[in-house]
Image (cartoon, helix red, strand yellow):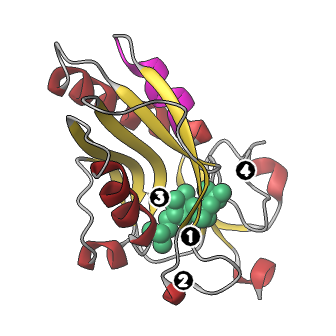
Amino acid sequence: MDSAHLENDLVNVLFTQEQIQERLGEMAQQIAADYEGKDLLMVGVLRGAVMVMADLSRALPRHCEMDWMAISSYGSGTKSSGVVRILKDLDTDITGRHVLIVDEIIDTGLTLSWLVNSLGSRGPASVEIATLLRKPEALSMPVEPKYVGWDIPNEFVVGYGLDYHEKYRNLRDIGTLAPHVYS
Ligand code: PRP
């Protein structure tokens, strides 16, 4: 789906599909250089990270393994509840492995700060994060992604894996949702 198919749902397009692919290509080059000579296990956080994982992994000029986790960040409560649960765990034993968590956005930072601690307790060689987007609120959380596509304002963004009520994930671009859609 393209932005043109959405009529007035978006206030603006933040990043076009071309910009996203270019930035992911740059991140992939950096990852390839940093992990040279090391095995690499990329862990995607379902469901939003599917697009980033697909494109970032294919931009890598080397082999990598992929595995997936599903995490419920807030249950039925709000973000402030701070409750994190594993809904689907890894199929891979990460002992001694170099793990790169792949996500599309760090918002409050709760999910990934918890996940880094959780995976870190399993004896990996390393755990790092690659995220396409990061919001300013996350900067105050104990989460330090090694690879960040862009820092963005604290706006409601959708597309390229990011949803509103499970819609817009298949939008090629990333845009700011118009308030009339969610108010
Ligand atoms: C999104 C995103 C991150 C998390 C970030 O997932 O994929 O994992 O929220 O938010 P935080 O920094 O405030 O913890 P979400 O829970 O919306 O699930 P989804 O990937 O299925 O959309």
Label 1 sits on residue: 73
- Whether pointer 2 and pointer 3 mark residues with C-beta atoms closer than 8 Å, the reply is no
3D distance between C-alphas at marks 4 and 3: 20 Å
- Whether pointer 4 and pointer 2 mark residues with C-beta atoms closer than 8 Å, the reply is no
Label 3 sits on residue: 105
- Whether pointer 1 and pointer 2 mark residues with C-beta atoms closer than 8 Å, the reply is yes
The amino acid sitting under disc 1 is Ser
Badge 4 or badge 3: first in the primary sequence: 4
**In terms of image quarters, where does ligand 1 lie?**
bottom right
3D distance between C-alphas at marks 4 and 2: 29 Å
Q: Which of labels 3 and 1 is toward the front?
A: 1
Label 2 sits on residue: 79
Residue 153 percent across, percent down from the top left: 41, 73
Q: State the SS at label 3.
A: strand
Residue 12 visible here: no
Question: What mark, if any, has residue 3 been given in the picture?
Answer: 4
3D distance between C-alphas at marks 3 and 1: 13 Å
Residue 133 in the image: above or below residue 177: above
Q: Which residues are magenta?
A: 52-61
Mark 2 Cβ and ligand 1 under 8 Å apart: yes
On screen, residue 8 versus residue 46, left or right, reads right
Mark 3 Cβ and ligand 1 under 8 Å apart: yes
**Residue in the foreground of this view, choosing between 81 and 179:** 81
On screen, residue 167 versus residue 12, left or right, reads right
Residue 41 in the image: above or below residue 100: above
Q: Residues within 10 Å of mark 2 (few under 14, many from 20)?
A: some
Badge 2 or badge 3: first in the primary sequence: 2
The amino acid sitting under disc 3 is Ile
**Residue in the foreground of this view, choosing between 108 and 26:** 108
Q: State the SS at label 4.
A: helix
Q: Which of labels 2 and 3 is toward the front?
A: 2
The residue at 83%/49% (across/down) is: 5
